[in-house]
Amino acid sequence: MGVKFAREYEDIIAELTGALEQVEDCYTFFDMEAQDWAGLEPEERKECLRTLADDVFYGLGTEPEMELGQGILSYEADKHIVTVAYPNAVTRIVRLI
């Protein structure tokens, strides 16, 4: 199926990366422990999250909902959005058009 989008891909990924930064335990995707993640330089963490955003974006095209750390990501094709839901926090919305 694939995720359909009309915005610039880089803008979507930048926004999605920012949303993923707020997901608690997102480093578990990389099979890392909390101390390993904390040991990375901020720029290294940002690059990992950028790669994760790419993976998530394409993964949502085949699996419209996925868990990541303590968050849930969803692709709502009819609304042209990706949502990043955090427990006990506001849901972030990334618009695709």
Image: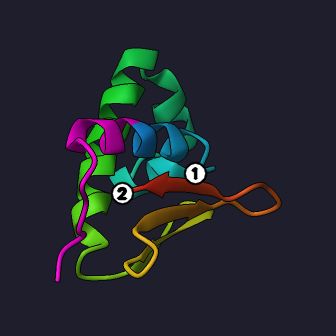
Total marks drawn? 2
Name above or below for residue 65 compared with residue 15. Answer: below
Determine which quarter of the picture holds residue 59.
bottom left
What element does badge 2 sit on? loop
Figure quadrant of the N terminus: bottom left
Q: Compare residues 5 and 91 and report the one nearer the observer.
A: 5
Q: Which region shows up in magenta?
A: 1-14
Image coordinates of residue 60 in percent, x first then y, are: 31, 72
Image coordinates of residue 81 in percent, x first then y, are: 44, 65
Determine which quarter of the picture holds residue 76.
bottom left
Q: Compare residues 8 and 44 and report the one nearer the observer.
A: 8
Q: Compare residues 41 and 74 and report the one nearer the observer.
A: 74
Residue that appears at 42% across and 22% down: 40
Q: Is residue 89 magenta?
A: no
Crowding around mark 1 (Cα neighbors within 10 Å: few <14, some 14 to 19, many 20+) is: some
Name above or below for residue 29 compared with residue 49. Answer: below
